[in-house]
Image (cartoon, grey):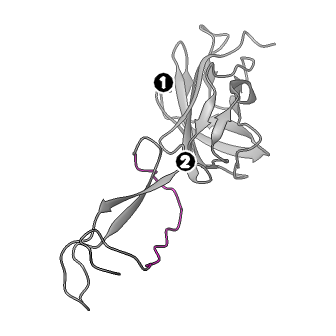
């Protein structure tokens, strides 16, 4: 029987940009005491909203809160990731724990209801985050603009374009191909392209 629901559930990523691949950190607190303590061979079940893409064998890393030599393996069915803890001294007791799940494909931009995400463990029943999960639309930004140069010579440093979230933060591991196509028109200096 389950001791109680896990608590303090959050789903966060450094890359909340639509239709990109991201690592998601899932934080939760098991019930206190021996009833909610996790150790090797125990399972953590993480459910993502059905619009997200989850690889069949995602890489998972136990992070903060876990003690000992914790490692983990994972398998997925649809958007449900089942994580099995390993390591002879692995444990999570009386503390919040974080697992990072790699390779999740973000859906279209939008706000996804909190109750469509959840975490449960071998010992504790499921709980959802209290806030919706928000995926943003990406934007392109020039982080290194063109410099003076001569016709037929490459500009140095090279022009660099970055995919960013709506707040201007770099979208890490975005996997998005950016193609710039020259067009005709007037350049700021008044010359014609």
Discs 1/2, front = 2
* Residue ID for mark 2: 17
Residue marked by disc 1: 65
Q: Is residue 178 above or below residue 102?
A: below
x and y percent of residue 74 in the render?
68, 44
Element type where label 2 sits in the image: loop
N-terminal-most mark, 1 or 2: 2
Left or right side of 19 for 51 = right
From the viewer's perspective, is 138 left or right of 84? Answer: left
In the picture, the disc for residue 47 is none
Label 1 – label 2 distance at C-alpha: 28 Å
- The quarter of the picture where residue 5 lies is top right
> Left or right: where does residue 89 sit relative to residue 120?
left
Q: Which residues are magenta?
A: 169-183
- Mark 1–mark 2 contact, CB under 8 Å? no
Query: Which structural element holds mark 1?
Result: loop
Q: x, y percentage for residue 94?
A: 53, 12
Q: Is residue 127 magenta?
A: no
Q: Dividing the image into 4 quarters, which one contains the C terminus?
A: bottom left
Residues packed near mark 2 inside 10 Å, few (<14), some (14 to 19) or many (20 plus): many
């Amino acid at each position: 029987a389950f001791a109680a629901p896990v608590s303090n559930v959050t789903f966060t990523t450094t890359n909340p940009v639509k239709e990109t691949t991201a690592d998601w950190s899932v934080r939760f607190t098991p019930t206190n005491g021996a009833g909610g303590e996790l150790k090797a061979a125990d399972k953590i079940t993480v459910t993502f909203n059905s619009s997200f893409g989850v690889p069949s064998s995602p890489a998972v890393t136990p992070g903060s809160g876990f003690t000992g030599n914790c490692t983990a393996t994972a398998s997925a069915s649809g958007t449900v990731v089942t994580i099995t803890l390993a390591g002879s001294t692995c444990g999570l007791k009386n503390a919040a724990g974080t697992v990072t799940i790699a390779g999740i494909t973000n859906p279209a931009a939008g706000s996804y209801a909190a109750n469509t995400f959840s975490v449960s463990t071998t010992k504790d029943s499921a709980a959802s985050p209290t806030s919706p999960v928000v995926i943003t639309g990406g934007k392109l930004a020039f982080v290194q603009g063109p410099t003076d140069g001569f016709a037929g010579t490459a500009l140095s440093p090279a022009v660099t374009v970055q995919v960013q979230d709506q707040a201007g933060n770099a979208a890490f591991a975005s996997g998005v191909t950016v193609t710039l196509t020259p067009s005709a028109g007037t350049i700021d200096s008044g010359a014609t392209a």
